[in-house]
Amino acid sequence: MTTSQDALLPGTQRALLHRIAVAQSEGRAPSLVAAVVRGGQAVWHGARSSVDGHAPDENVQYRIGSITKTFTAVLVMRLRDEGVLDLGDPLDKHLPGTGVGEATITELLAHTSGVAAESPGPWWERTPGSLRPELADVLGEQPLLHPAGRLHHYSNTGYTLLGALVEELRGAPWEEVLRREILEPLGLHRTTPQPEAPYAGGWAVHPWADALLPEPMEDLGRMASAGQLWSTTGDLAKFAVFLARGDERVLGAESVREMRTPAAPAEAPDVVDGVTYGLGMQLHARGGHLLFGHSGSLPGFLANLTISLEDDVAAVVLANCTSGPSLGAVGDDLVRIVAEAEPRIPEPWRPLREVDPAVLELAGQWYWGTGAFGLRVTADGHISLGPLTGGGRGSRFRPNGDGTWTGLEDYYAGELLRPVRRPDGALSHLDLGSFVFTRQPYDPDAPVPGGVDPQGWRGIK
C-alpha cells in the first residue's frame, strides 16, 4: 500500500499531527502511531514517541486486543455465507457440550448471549493461556450471568467460543484459518498472532509519576480469538477498507454491511450516548454520522479503528501503554478533521442506462392516507420511497424480477412493495406490506381498506 503524505492538504496534515501529539503528550504514552484512510487507501501516517529520532512507522506492530474480535466475526460470517451454519443456530448444534449451547451464534457475535465477560481464575490477560487449556477452564462452572438476548454484556469468553466454533467447523486451528481466509487474501502480512519484529514493547505508566513498568505479553491460548493479534497501522488501514467496502475473496459488501447493523439491545445510557453493537463491530454516532469499527486493549497496549462510511474516511490509532490516551476520542477526531477540512467529493451524477416504462410509471408523488411521499427511480436500478416533508418511514427497494420490490432498510427492510394494476392495465396503487399508497389522498377509485366516505372532502360550517 502506498502512503502519500501529499494526498491531504498541508493544513489538514498539521491538524492531524497536532491531535496525535496532544494525545501522546497529555496521555503520557511511550509512543502513539496513527493512520488515516480515504478513498480506499492510506493517505496519512503520523507518530509521536518518547524516544528521540525513533518514531514508529506504519510497519511497526502493536498488540490490538479486541480488534481481534472483528477478525473472528468475519470468519463466522464466512461460514454463514457458505451455508455451513445459520446465525440463528444454537451453539450446541455445531459445538455441543459447552454448557452455554442454547445461546445462538448471533447472540455470541453481538455480546447478548448472557455469557460472563471474563474467565474465572487468575487475571487472564496477565497470565499464560496454558492455565486455561480447555473451554471448560475458560468458562468455569457458571458461565451464564444473564438471560440470552435480553442484555448487551460484553464477553471475551463468548468470542473464545466463536473461535472454538471456527476450529470445529474448519477442522484447523483458529490462527491457521485466520491466515488462510483473511490475512493472506487481504495482504495483511504484518498481522500475526505472535509479535514479529519490528514491534513495540508494552508499558504501564505510573499514574502519579513519569515512570514506566514493562507489562507481560502473554499468549492467550484458548482465548486468542478474543484478543491475541498484533498488527500495524498499515495493515489495519487495509482492513478498514475491507470493512467499509467488502471483498468477494473474503466477505461481500452485503455481509460486512450486516456486521455494522445494530444487533444488540441498548441500555438507557447507551441510547443517550448513541452507542450500540453489531456483529463483531462497535457502533456510535457523531454529529449525525454513524461511525463503526472496534477498540482494543491488553496490558501495555491500546488500539482503535474508526470508520465513517458517509465521509469515506477511517482512522487507526495505536499506543503502547496500558492506560492514558483515549484512542476512541482520537480516532473520532482524526475522522472529523479530514471530513470537515476536506469534505468528500461526491461521484458525478449519471442517468439510467435504460428506462423501463413500467418502472418509470411508478415515479412521482404518492399518498399514504394524507401523508405525501415521493418515489424516485435511481441509476443503481433501485427505487426509493420516502416522505416529502418532516420525518417518516422511508426505504430503498430492490427489484425482484417479477414486478415487485423488496425493502432494504429501516422499517420496510424485507417488506414487499407491489404495484397493483386495474383490469385495463392502468396503475391503481402501491401495496406496501398491506398499506395502500394512492396518487391522491384517499383516492376513491382505489381499494382503500375501510373505504372512503362517498361525500368526499368537506369543510366545517
Image (cartoon, helix red, strand yellow):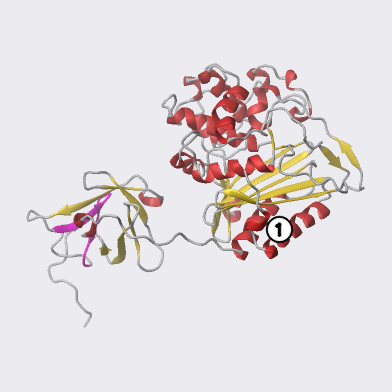
Numbered circles on residues, count? 1
Residue visible at 69% across and 63% down in the picture: 10
Q: Position of residue 366 (x, y in %)?
A: 26, 63
Q: Position of residue 47 (x, y in %)?
A: 76, 50
Q: Nearer the viewer, residue 454 or 39?
A: 39
Looking at the figure, which quarter contains the N terminus?
A: top right
Quickly name the residue at label 1: 16
Q: Position of residue 172 (x, y in %)?
A: 57, 18
Q: Is residue 261 above or below residue 136?
A: below
Which residue is the extreme one toward the left?
424
Residue visible at 77% across and 32% down in the picture: 197
329 horizontally vs 277: left or right: right
Main secondary structure found in the magenta portion? strand
Name the element at disc 1: helix
Q: Is residue 65 above or below residue 180?
A: below
Q: Quadrant of residue 402?
A: top left
- Is residue 114 visible in this depiction of the protein? no
- Is residue 121 visible in this depiction of the protein? yes
- Badge 1 crowding class, 10 Å Cα cut-off, few under 14, some 14 to 19, many 20 or more, is many
Residue stretch in magenta: 427-440
Q: Nearer the viewer, residue 282 or 181?
A: 181
Q: Nearer the viewer, residue 330 or 262?
A: 330
Which residue is the extreme one toward the bottom?
461
Check if residue 83 falls in the magenta segment.
Answer: no
25 horizontally vs 191: left or right: right
Q: Position of residue 440 (x, y in %)?
A: 21, 67
Kind of residue at disc 1: Leu
455 horizontally vs 134: left or right: left
Q: Is residue 205 above or below residue 84?
A: below
Check if residue 433 falls in the magenta segment.
Answer: yes
Q: Nearer the viewer, residue 104 or 221?
A: 221
Looking at the figure, which quarter contains the C terminus?
A: bottom left
